[in-house]
Amino acid sequence: MNQSTNQNQKPQFQTKRPLFDYESLNPTREDDDSIMDGFHYKSGCRYHFFEGVKYPLPCDTDETYRLKINYSISRYCWKGNIFYSPLENELAKGGIRVLDVGCGPGGWLLDMSTQYPNSTFVSVDISSMIRKDQQPSNMGFLQCNIHNGLPFPDNIFDFVFMSHMFTSITENQWQDVVDDLVRVTKSVGWIELMEGEYINSTSGPVTREIQTQLTILMRSRGININICPSVYNILKILKILKMKYSLVKLLLLLKWNCWRIELEDMFKISQKEMDDYETTLNIHGFYVQKKIILQKVKILGNSGIYYDVLSC
Ligand SMILES: C[S@@+](CC[C@H](N)C(=O)[O-])C[C@H]1O[C@@H](n2cnc3c(N)ncnc32)[C@H](O)[C@@H]1O
């Protein structure tokens, strides 16, 4: 873990609305399914439309703002430790190439590229949410659909990071996405994934009911809300780190009501309930070195003793 990051650092993003042009990102608040401009609009939110993309969350100013707050809270809860892969010295020395897949508004990448000015940071996302005037010179962004393959040659990144993408990747797509992350990672590079565990024992009855409804709704899109065990299996990971905190869940649930407006009353009860039950959200951080993944896959193929291999 990168312990030397500033432990008392305050969240970088302010809790005020960003100053960029709200109307241009949310040009209409009326429902509109015509997809004339490549988007459709529902319950005051704007959504992408890409053939075959199941991502259910909006792409507009409110969502950009939510993702920024989400990241700021996470970083605060993690006491500034925003990655686990043992690359801190190399990053500081410079010359390291980092890729953030599905970067959203780029909170993680902005922190990393500022903290390690001698390394290079590249990000991809289907939406362009990063303000150009905020990008340091060692950071770049490419708009792309990861399900068409990452637009990079093999073996070029030292560190590939991907966080909170469970809504972007259907259960059937996970293996291909991970294979592509491995492909673009250098032979001894590191891959790090972070995903939340959205069903857990600390929820009250109303929150649990919402989680059940969301699970069903997501299933209908092929998305598994409880993806961590599958990610674990796909990566054949060496180490799992778990953290617990409570605030992020509240923010995540707040936004879901955009597309399930009938659940609005339940969301209000759930917010209070989460305080009463001290509901927490586990975030699983998976980090693994490419050469070790390849070895593991090979050993697994020969022996099939998964858990023995993991404990080596
Ligand atoms: C929940 S957000 C997570 C953002 C960021 N990684 C974080 O941890 O805050 C999911 C991101 O995936 C992006 N996304 C969804 N489907 C995608 C696709 N097919 N290709 C590339 N990006 C995608 C969305 O635009 C969004 O920025």
Image (spheres, rainbow, N blue to C red):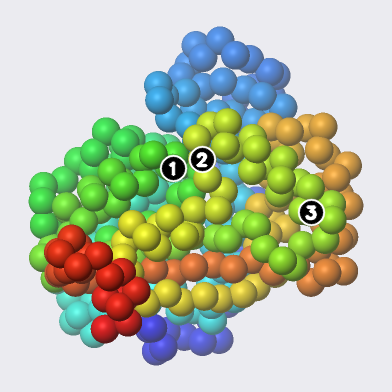
Q: Nearer the viewer, residue 298 or 85?
A: 298
Q: Nearer the viewer, residue 187 or 89?
A: 187
Of marks 1 and 3, the one in the foreground: 1
In the rendered image, which residue does mark 3 sit on? 207
Q: Is mark 2 within 8 Å of ligand 1?
A: no
Disc nearer the start of the sequence (1/3): 1
Mark 1 surroundings within 10 Å by alpha-carbon count, few (fewer than 14), some (14 through 19), many (20 or more): some
Disc nearer the start of the sequence (2/1): 1
Q: Is mark 1 within 8 Å of ligand 1?
A: no
- How far, Cα to Cα, is label 1 from label 3? 24 Å
Q: Position of residue 247 (x, y in %)?
A: 70, 66
Is the residue 125 above or below the residue 156 in the image? above
Which amino acid type corresponds to the residue marked 1 in the rendered image? Answer: Glu
Occupied quadrant, residue 297 = bottom left
Would you say 36 lies left or right of 182 here?
Answer: right
Would you say 285 lies left or right of 250 here?
Answer: left
Q: Position of residue 85 (x, y in %)?
A: 31, 76
Would you say 143 lies left or right of 289 here?
Answer: right
State the mark number for residue 171.
1
Is the residue 155 above or below the residue 175 in the image? below
Q: Nearer the viewer, residue 123 or 153?
A: 153
Would you say 232 lies left or right of 149 here?
Answer: right
In percent of the image, x 33 and y 57: which residue is there?
234
Q: Secondary structure at mark 1?
A: helix
Which amino acid type corresponds to the residue marked 3 in the rendered image? Answer: Thr
- How far, Cα to Cα, is label 2 from label 1? 6 Å
Q: Secondary structure at mark 2?
A: loop
Occupied quadrant, residue 216 = top right
